[in-house]
Image (tube, grey):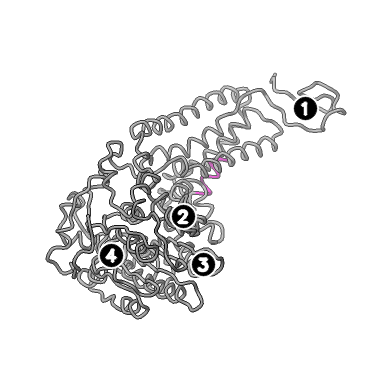
């Protein structure tokens, strides 16, 4: 006979008192310890984290971890309430469904491939649910064996949790001190002599910095893609912009490029620090989170609004008063794509929320709302605003048409990558015109507008050749960028044709805040592979030597 407590009309299983003195129904506990549903939920998150430690920290995974634990606890509670027992069987059933939901791709990915279910995995959903129901029915028949299986599942779940946790600890030990390589306060102290006492005599302007990821320069598009993109340049010049047509990015990847721009300096300190190793991106992410530009502008009373992408580097900033990424973070997107959320979202009607697991975290749902909010930023309020926006256009996936319609995966693949890139250049041009006209409307606070790319598109190349040894044409394609400035008053005496982004804010701050920041020599660096992202090689002479995109350079007003 089972020793499970039984609730009857006469007695209460916990107190053995007359039922009249107790609630009519209580959930009975069989004195087993059902930890495994929660441990399995936690391990599903930590496993993904442990496999991406070069890009991910605890702050990136916290929200997904909390949601996974709440889901597991809720599933367990619902089953216990339905059965009226918080026993081993309820825990086993809970773990069946927690695993089915959170380990969906691992458990049913093979079935999905067999059914040719494709990315949505909808075809595998009925099969998966049927298997989970069958496993539930089996668990209900375990009787006394449920207690032994519950103990075994606790041990298995502990192992599932410890394996990724140990990997996380190992990585943190190997890379201990890496995040200390960037000290935001010390970075500000280095430039303090050039900003102390600086003040402008006028009300500070709003500052809008819009980064169009992989938007190639006019010269690169003409020479290597056969496209005349001069119309948008003429539009900008007609609106009073200065176009630095010979500009290049300082590095060949987004993280390095934007970090150096916001740091107003090169990343040499990271390269020299022995704690910064291999492909650990987190020191760069820290520079993107807390940087000189943001600290300086906050000290001048600016309200900072950041419009990030799904990418962890710009998804949010601790300096920002408002973070407006409009979607899941990179980690959350990758994690929830492996769960039952993916097929369920595709079964449900399309909404901005249910579509956010598609197309690199819902680009189609992100771009338009962000553009509308950027256009209206700073209209109200007495404080000047600093808007930093990282727009993943013309960056892949190439899912926008030239007029901004969103294509399906099949439609984008049929169009092809290069045509898709060029059509997204056209869409970016539409956005540029729209933003510029809105930000220059009469009656608005004067605004500095910076339209800039962080890198160019990827050329077709042999990936076994280190970037710093790549042909000059490949380096020109990868680093030739859009770089345009609008200054109220149109004083462009501090700019030059081949200025690089590392000097952008040095010019802006000197022009509008009376700082005395020296200009840096414009250099272009490349690191060999993604496995050694801090091994910097100066490729400036190769990119800016004789060639079709080198462009005229003005004599230096720059110092080293």
State which quarter of the image contains the C terminus: bottom left
Judge depth for marks 2 and 1 and give the one in front. Answer: 2
Gap between marks 4 and 2 measured at Cα: 31 Å
Check disc 3 and report the residue beneath it.
378
Whether residues under marks 2 and 3 lie with C-beta atoms below 8 angstroms apart, the answer is: no
Horizontal side of 499 relative to 23 (left or right) equals left
Q: Single out the mark in the foreground, 4 or 2.
A: 2
Q: Position of residue 34 (x, y in %)?
A: 60, 28
Q: CA distance from mark 2 to mark 3?
A: 18 Å
- Give the residue drawn at x 38%, y 49%: 188
Q: Which residues are magenta?
A: 125-133
| 539 relative to 153 in the view: left or right | left
Residue lying farthest to the right in this orientation:
20
Q: Position of residue 6 (x, y in %)?
A: 75, 25
Give the CA distance from mark 4 to mark 1: 74 Å
**Mark 3, residues whose alpha carbon is within 10 Å: few (<14), some, or many (≥20)?**
many
Q: Which is nearer the N-term, disc 1 or disc 3? A: 1
Question: Which of these two is toward me, 128 or 301?
Answer: 301
Mark 2–mark 1 Cα distance, whole angstroms, equals 66 Å
């Amino acid at each position: 006979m089972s020793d499970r407590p039984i609730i009857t009309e006469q007695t209460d299983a916990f107190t053995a008192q007359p039922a009249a003195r107790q609630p009519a129904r209580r959930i009975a506990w069989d004195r087993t310890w059902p930890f495994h549903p929660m441990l399995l939920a936690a391990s599903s998150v930590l496993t993904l984290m442990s496999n991406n430690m070069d890009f991910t920290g605890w702050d990136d995974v916290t929200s997904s971890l909390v949601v996974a634990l709440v889901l597991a606890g809720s599933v367990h509670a619902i089953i216990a309430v339905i059965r009226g027992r918080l026993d081993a069987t309820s825990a086993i059933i809970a773990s069946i469904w927690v695993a089915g939901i959170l380990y969906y791709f691992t458990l049913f990915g093979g079935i999905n491939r067999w059914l040719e279910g494709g990315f949505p995995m909808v075809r595998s959903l009925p099969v998966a649910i049927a298997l989970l129901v069958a496993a539930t029915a089996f668990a209900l028949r375990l009787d006394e064996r449920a207690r032994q299986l519950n103990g075994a599942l606790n041990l298995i779940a502990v192992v599932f949790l410890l394996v990724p946790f140990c990997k996380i600890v190992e990585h943190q030990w190997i890379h201990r001190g890496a995040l200390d390589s960037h000290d935001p306060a010390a970075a500000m102290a280095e430039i303090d002599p050039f900003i102390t006492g600086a003040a402008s005599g006028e009300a500070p302007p709003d500052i809008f910095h819009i980064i169009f990821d992989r938007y190639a320069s006019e010269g690169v598009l003409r020479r290597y893609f056969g496209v005349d993109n001069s119309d948008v340049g003429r539009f900008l010049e007609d609106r009073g912009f200065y176009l630095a047509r010979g500009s290049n990015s300082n590095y060949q990847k987004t993280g390095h490029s934007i970090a150096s721009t916001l740091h107003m300096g090169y990343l040499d300190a990271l390269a020299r620090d022995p704690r910064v190793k291999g492909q650990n991106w987190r020191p760069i992410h820290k520079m993107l989170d807390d940087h000189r530009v943001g600290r300086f502008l906050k000290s001048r009373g600016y309200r900072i609004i950041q419009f990030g992408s799904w990418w962890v580097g710009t998804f949010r900033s601790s300096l920002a008063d408002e973070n407006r990424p409009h979607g899941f973070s990179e980690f959350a997107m990758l994690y929830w794509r492996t769960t039952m959320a993916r097929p369920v979202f595709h079964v449900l009607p399309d909404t901005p929320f249910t579509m956010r697991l598609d197309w690199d975290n819902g680009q189609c749902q992100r771009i338009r709302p962000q553009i509308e909010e950027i256009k209206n930023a700073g209209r109200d309020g007495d404080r000047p605003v600093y808007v930093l926006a990282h727009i993943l256009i013309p960056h892949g996936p190439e899912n926008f048409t030239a007029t901004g319609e969103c294509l399906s995966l099949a439609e984008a693949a049929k169009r092809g990558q290069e045509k898709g890139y060029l059509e997204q250049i056209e869409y970016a041009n539409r956005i540029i015109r729209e933003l510029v006209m809105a930000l220059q409307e009469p009656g608005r606070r004067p605004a500095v507008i910076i339209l800039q790319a962080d890198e160019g598109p990827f050329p077709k190349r042999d990936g076994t050749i280190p970037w710093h040894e790549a042909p000059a044409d490949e380096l020109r394609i990868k680093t030739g960028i859009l770089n345009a400035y609008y200054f109220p008053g149109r004083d462009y005496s501090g700019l030059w044709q081949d200025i690089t982004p590392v000097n952008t804010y040095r010019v802006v701050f000197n022009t509008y805040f009376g700082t005395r920041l020296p200009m840096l020599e414009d250099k272009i660096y490349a690191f060999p592979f993604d496995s050694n992202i801090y091994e910097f090689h100066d490729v400036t002479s190769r990119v800016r030597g004789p060639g079709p995109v080198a462009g005229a350079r003005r004599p230096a007003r720059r110092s080293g």
